[in-house]
């Protein structure tokens, strides 16, 4: 039986009570340069979904003053709850990881943007910050900077997962995605150079400082170093947050061994490996290893690590309709193809669902998804069609049921 690996989870579960803020103090003693060298050696990439090399992002503001660091805890992807798990179970660990990161990037201001629905996490993080005078004094003594730490409560827009939308939201304006360049590292919050990183990414910094960059990079595989927190949900016996070593565990092992297999007397139908912006896999595709490169090569993505499992009782058309409903409501509307494309796809899936669809709708959905993904400014529009199109291609029988006059074959839908 495969065992769950526990690096981040061990700290979260056991806490750092014996030596509060030990990673932060260790980082202060090492100094910025040494910490950054360890980060470079680690090969850490962002855990929010984009998998951008963290040292490259941080290196771009290395000699810059007035840097702002934002911890993105908006976690709006349906099926993702790992950041919530961290904040609710060990807010001190996240705060010290944020402070350690702020020290390395030489930040003068630190924000944490938390999803509004996470009321418990918001109150725990606020309480932790209120009690952090001693550690903030240590920061000031070492750097000469009186660091401002502020909690910002998100107002429920999925698009704020995009870093420039999130920045607009903190500035108090409509959270549309900005055109890049300039990138936030050049011109971000109130025009200051700004680093935005996900909760899990920053927590990895504590591990890197504790164990060293070489040890961190010995875990995982090329392009996917370290471990990954997975939010496992759906028709599974043991849903929850699990930690895996990337590239060493398959999707099937996660489902069968960590998740305990499919709930009840049912069979696996499909798996969404990285949240509802990613392409699904059917049963004979889930021996793929879980890391950024393997999932990409297999035609999907790891995203933020939200694995959603469906059994044969789940209707792919209904699931696609719900996803389209979500994206048509969450688009910020600034790019026409995303705004109108998601609305049209939603309308067509609704019609299909009540047996009023037409054969050409399936081809149209694919074409609109493709156009939207090319013309979209941010990740929402670029990936909104992934799940729907893969459902049509891989589970044609569910769609045939609603379009009984056609004999749907995969090749035709792909044209
Ligand atoms: S792709 Fe969609 S969500 Fe993103 S900026 Fe354009 S309209 Fe807004």
Image (tube, rainbow, N blue to C red):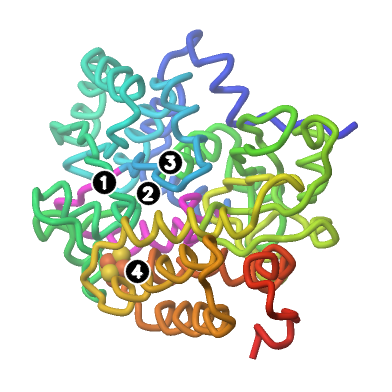
- Do the residues under discs 2 and 1 have CB atoms within 8 angstroms? yes
Does the residue tagged 4 have its C-beta within 8 Å of any atom of ligand 1?
Answer: no
Q: Is residue 15 above or below residue 312?
A: above
Q: Position of residue 338 (x, y in %)?
A: 33, 73
Between circles 3 and 4, the one closer to the viewer is 4
Residue corresponding to mark 1: 69
Side (left or right) of 237 relative to 296: right
Circle 1 Cα neighbour tier, 10 Å, few/some/many (<14 / 14–19 / ≥20) = many
Viewer-side residue, 44 vs 377: 377
**Residue sitting at 65 percent across and 53 percent down?**
315
Side (left or right) of 16 relative to 168: right
Magenta residues: mostly which secondary structure?
Answer: loop
Query: Residue 29: which quarter of the image?
Result: top left
Measure the C-alpha gap from mark 4 to mark 2: 31 Å
Residue corresponding to mark 3: 202
Q: In the rendering, which numbered label is found on residue 197?
A: 2
């Amino acid at each position: 039986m495969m065992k769950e690996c526990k690096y981040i989870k061990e700290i979260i579960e056991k806490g750092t009570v014996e030596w509060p803020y030990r990673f932060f103090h260790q980082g202060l003693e090492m100094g910025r340069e040494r910490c950054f060298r360890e980060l470079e050696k680690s090969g850490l990439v962002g855990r929010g979904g984009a998998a951008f090399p963290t040292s490259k992002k941080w290196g771009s503001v290395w000699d810059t003053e007035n840097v702002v660091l934002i911890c993105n805890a908006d976690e709006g992807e349906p099926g993702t709850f790992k950041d919530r798990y961290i904040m609710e179970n060990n807010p001190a660990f996240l705060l010290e990881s944020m402070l350690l990161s702020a020290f390395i990037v030489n930040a003068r201001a630190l924000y944490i943007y938390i999803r509004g629905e996470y009321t418990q996490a918001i109150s725990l993080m606020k309480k932790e910050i209120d009690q952090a005078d001693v550690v903030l004094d240590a920061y000031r003594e070492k750097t000469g900077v009186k660091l401002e730490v502020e909690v910002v409560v998100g107002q429920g827009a999925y698009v704020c997962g995009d870093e420039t939308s999130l920045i607009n939201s903190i500035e108090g304006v409509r959270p549309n995605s900005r055109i890049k360049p300039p990138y936030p590292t050049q011109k971000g919050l109130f025009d200051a150079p700004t680093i935005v990183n996900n909760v899990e990414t920053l927590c990895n910094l504590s591990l890197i400082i504790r164990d060293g960059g070489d040890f961190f990079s010995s875990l995982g595989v090329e392009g996917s170093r370290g471990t990954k927190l997975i939010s496992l949900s759906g028709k599974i016996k043991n849903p929850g947050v699990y930690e895996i070593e990337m590239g060493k565990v398959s999707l099937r092992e996660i489902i069968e061994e960590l998740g305990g297999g499919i709930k009840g007397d049912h069979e696996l139908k499909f798996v969404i490996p990285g949240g509802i912006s990613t392409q699904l896999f059917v049963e004979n595709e889930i021996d793929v290893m879980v890391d950024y490169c393997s999932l990409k090569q297999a035609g999907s993505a790891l995203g933020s690590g939200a694995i959603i499992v469906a059994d044969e009782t789940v209707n792919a058309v209904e699931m696609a309709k719900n996803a389209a409903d979500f994206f048509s409501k969450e688009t910020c509307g600034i790019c026409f193809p995303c705004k109108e494309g998601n609305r049209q796809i939603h309308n067509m899936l609704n019609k299909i669902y009540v047996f009023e669809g037409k054969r050409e709708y399936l081809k149209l959905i694919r074409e609109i998804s493709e156009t939207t993904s090319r013309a979209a400014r941010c990740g929402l529009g670029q990936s909104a069609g992934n799940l729907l199109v893969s459902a049509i291609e891989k589970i044609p029988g569910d769609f045939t049921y609603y379009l009984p006059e056609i004999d749907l074959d995969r090749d035709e839908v792909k044209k």
